[in-house]
């Protein structure tokens, strides 16, 4: 007996000693291996990120030099220089930002972390960064005239053709100076970046050597831990008491655990041992002996139930990998519904997890754990909604900051008028089919105009909402009969568009207030007395003309880019445009330019093969005819109008019959262009296919009391000539009416 007690005491003492040693070695492992290893790994990661960052910057100097050469080439060939100038600006800003990041490393971030891990190399690295900063600042000053250049470097003369203007000559000189300096400065900048990368690589090498030593230390400590664990296991083999305690603890766990736990046998029957939480999770008492199928039947959809049964059966197949199967668990997060006493239903989300239980080498049971994750799902949905709302606000703010303030103000004012018009049309009573169709066409034109200008100035959020509005309008247009109830869903779309525009106005207002505060904080020059006011309706609107020209150029560039084409817009005489005609002319020009780039201008390869320049031209010209009013000419040098294609599209869209198509003349073909719903595009996109643009032009011209003419030569041009009455004459006609 005494020997037995002594043996037990020795076993307990050995177990305590082994436990103390394991604890000590574990602490040593954490202190000597995990913490330093984590620090070194973090150092390697930071250094690698810094090294990658520095390496990525080496492409910018060469890209800048290449862009300057492109500027020279285009100046010599009288080409469009804004593209390479934008490239110089973007690359210079990117390199400046990167060098500022390296220079201000003390402000934090990965470069600061990488900069603080090798004290011996820090002065040299700072010196290299300083040299790099100085070299770049000197070269950046030469690039500044190129970066700040905006405008047209040429002027056209009918006798001598296109030639450099004074701004173009200055730009040429600046480009030559920048390129000359680049050949000496860019190799120096590249060399400094290489030296900085070398310093970072050296740090990585040193950190890797230290990490290797730490890992060897960890292996030694781990080996000692394994030995102690084996000794401890041997000492505890005879202590059956711990097994009985473990059994009692398991019973306590089953009573108190909040998760549902149960075992399934090969027949998918639930065993007698299960956690008390099962009754609350599944709202039933008869758990033991119930089949898994009956447990889920009625609370999950039949399709989910069938998939779940197949999944559980697969778990009993030996050749199936358990971890792989878990990734396709159909009950990973499933919605369940229970009937309530009041006759309704309650919904919650349950998460099922499956684990094989083995006896020897065979699978004896499958352990199933069930958790109520309703709170987690609700939180995730709420978080997702908040993130989407926040992202939408950020996207809207960013898009607003990229739009010219004058363009934005003009767009918001014009779109507000269009929204009021749509609202008025929706409120207008109608009973007959023709009246409903007229309302639909009127709304379509207004929405299309808003979408067109939003696309032109880059407000994609409004463009997308307007396009969605057009989708609903298209669906109504395709219905065989209309009633007032069909227009009710449009109110929701209109409200969404109005709400978004109002939020955009609020953001603009906040930005304006911030700008006003900043201006008040910095005294400005003395105010100049305002000139005497003139009739805003009849006075030429030079500011509005410039805004229209920029809008049309942006629109043509964006549509051409999306269509794989190249196009530019040339505006002439818009400075003569009176303010009263500004919106009408702008809306007409937006639709005409969109139509010209989509339908008229050919791809560059087709144009070159036809003997044209690769870049298409859309010319917008306004002439004041005195008492004869104003003549607006919109012409593109594209493929021209193809009567056969127009007639075929009209027949396909059932605007005319096949018999009418056989006898149609040229004048009637031209009229088809302005029919509501007509388009030669097979599928509708954000830029074409609705059959609204040309109809909108005709409607605007008619509202202004003007006339429109069309001429075209296949393969050469399409020209729209619009005559608008003199404003005095138009006002007199309006009063007489």
Image: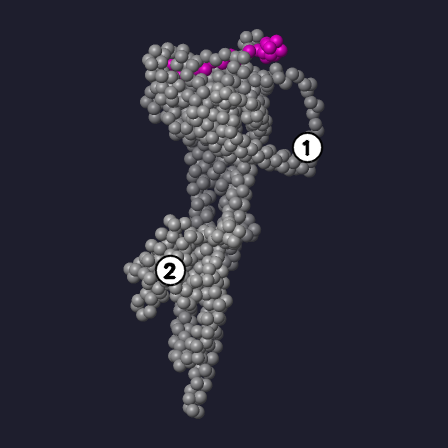
How far from the left and from the top, in percent, is residue 654?
Answer: 38, 20
Q: Is residue 510 above or below residue 316?
A: above
Q: Position of residue 513 (x, y in %)?
A: 65, 36
The quadrant of the image that shows the C terminus is top right
Mark 2 is surrounded, within 10 Å at the Cα level, by few (under 14), some (14 to 19) or many (20 or more) other residues, namely: some
Mark 2 vs mark 1, CA separation in Å: 83 Å
Residue in the foreground of this view, choosing between 24 and 184: 24
**Residue at screen point 56% across, 21% down:** 583
Mark 1 lies on a secondary structure that is loop
Mark 1: few/some/many CA within 10 Å (<14, 14-19, 20+)? few
Residue 384 makes an appearance in the image:
yes
Write down the region rendered in magenta: 713-737
Pointer 2 residue: 291
- Residue 536 in magenta stretch: no
Relative placement, left or right, of 443 versus 268 is right
- Residue 315: x, y in percent? 33, 59
Q: Residue 18 appears in which quarter of the rendering?
A: bottom left
Task: Looking at the image, tell me whether mark 2 or mark 1 is earlier in sequence order.
Answer: 2
Q: Looking at the rendering, in which quadrant would you find the N terminus?
A: bottom left
Residue at image location 54% in from the left, 12% down from the top:
705
Left or right: 327 in relation to 129: left
| Nearer to us in this view, 600 or 425 | 425
Q: Which is nearer the eye, 268 or 212? A: 268
Label ID, residue 723: none
Q: Is residue 726 magenta?
A: yes
Residue to which mark 1 is pinned: 524
């Amino acid at each position: 007996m005494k020997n037995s007690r002594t043996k037990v005491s020795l076993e307990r003492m050995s177990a305590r000693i082994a436990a103390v040693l394991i604890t000590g070695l574990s602490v040593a492992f954490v202190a000597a291996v995990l913490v330093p290893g984590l620090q070194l790994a973090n150092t390697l990661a930071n250094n690698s990120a810094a090294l990658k960052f520095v390496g990525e910057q080496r492409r910018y100097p060469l890209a800048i030099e290449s862009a300057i050469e492109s500027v020279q080439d285009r100046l010599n060939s009288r080409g469009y220089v804004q593209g390479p100038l934008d490239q110089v600006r973007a690359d210079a800003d990117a390199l400046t930002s990167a060098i500022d990041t390296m220079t201000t490393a003390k402000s934090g971030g990965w470069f600061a972390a990488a900069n603080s891990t090798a004290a011996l190399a820090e002065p040299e690295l700072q010196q290299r960064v300083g040299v790099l900063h100085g070299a770049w600042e000197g070269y950046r000053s030469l690039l500044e005239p190129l970066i700040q250049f905006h405008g047209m470097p040429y002027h056209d003369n009918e006798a001598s053709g296109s030639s450099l203007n004074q701004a173009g000559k200055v730009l040429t000189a600046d480009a030559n100076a920048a390129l000359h300096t680049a050949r000496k400065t860019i190799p120096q900048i590249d060399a400094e970046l290489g030296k900085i990368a070398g310093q970072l690589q050296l740090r990585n090498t040193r950190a890797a050597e230290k990490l290797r030593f730490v890992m060897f230390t960890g292996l030694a400590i781990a080996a000692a831990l394994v030995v102690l664990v084996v000794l401890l296991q041997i000492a505890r083999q005879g202590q059956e008491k711990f097994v009985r305690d473990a059994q009692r603890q398991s019973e306590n766990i089953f009573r108190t655990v909040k998760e549902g736990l149960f075992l399934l046998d090969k027949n998918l029957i639930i065993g007698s041992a299960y956690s008390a939480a099962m009754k609350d999770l599944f709202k039933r008492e008869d758990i033991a002996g119930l089949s898994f199928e009956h447990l889920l039947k009625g609370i999950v959809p039949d399709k989910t139930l069938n998939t779940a049964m197949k999944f559980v059966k697969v778990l009993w197949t030996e050749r199936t990998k358990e971890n792989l199967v878990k990734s396709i668990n159909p009950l990973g997060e499933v919605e369940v519904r229970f009937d309530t006493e009041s006759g309704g239903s309650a919904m919650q989300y349950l998460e099922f997890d499956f684990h094989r239980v083995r006896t020897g080498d065979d699978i004896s049971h499958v352990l199933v754990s069930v958790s109520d994750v309703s709170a987690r799902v609700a939180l995730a949905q709420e978080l997702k909604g908040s993130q989407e709302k926040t992202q939408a606000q950020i996207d809207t703010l960013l898009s607003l900051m990229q739009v010219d303030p004058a363009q934005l103000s003009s767009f918001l004012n014009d779109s507000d008028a269009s929204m009021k018009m749509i609202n008025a049309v929706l409120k207008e009573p109608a009973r007959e089919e023709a009246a409903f169709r007229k309302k639909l066409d009127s709304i379509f034109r207004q929405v299309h105009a808003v979408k067109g200008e939003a696309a032109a100035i880059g407000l994609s959020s409004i463009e997308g909402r307007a396009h969605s509005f057009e989708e609903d309008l298209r669906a109504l247009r395709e219905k065989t009969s209309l009633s007032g109830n069909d227009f009710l869903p449009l109110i929701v779309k209109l409200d969404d568009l109005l709400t978004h525009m109002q939020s955009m106005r609020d953001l603009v207002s906040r930005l304006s207030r911030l700008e006003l505060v900043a201006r008040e904080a910095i005294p400005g020059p003395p105010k100049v007395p305002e000139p005497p006011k003139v009739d805003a309706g009849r006075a030429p609107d030079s500011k509005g003309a410039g805004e229209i020209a920029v809008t049309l150029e942006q629109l043509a560039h964006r549509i051409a880019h999306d269509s794989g084409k190249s196009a530019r817009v040339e505006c002439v005489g818009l400075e003569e445009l009176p303010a009263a005609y500004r919106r009408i002319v702008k809306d007409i020009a937006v639709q005409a330019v969109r139509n010209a780039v989509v339908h008229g201008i050919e791809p560059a390869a087709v144009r070159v093969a036809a003997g044209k320049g690769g870049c298409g031209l859309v010319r917008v010209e306004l002439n004041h005819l005195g008492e004869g009013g104003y003549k607006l000419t919109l012409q593109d040098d594209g493929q021209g109008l193809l009567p056969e294609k127009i007639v075929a599209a009209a027949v396909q869209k059932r605007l005319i019959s096949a018999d009418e198509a056989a006898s149609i003349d040229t004048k009637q073909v031209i009229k088809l262009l302005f029919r509501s719903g007509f388009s030669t595009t097979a599928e509708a996109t954000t830029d074409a296919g609705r059959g609204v643009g040309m109809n909108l032009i005709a409607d605007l011209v008619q509202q202004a009391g003007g006339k429109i003419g069309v001429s075209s030569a296949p393969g050469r041009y399409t020209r729209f000539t619009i005559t608008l009455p003199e404003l005095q004459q138009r006002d007199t006609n309006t009063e007489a009416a």
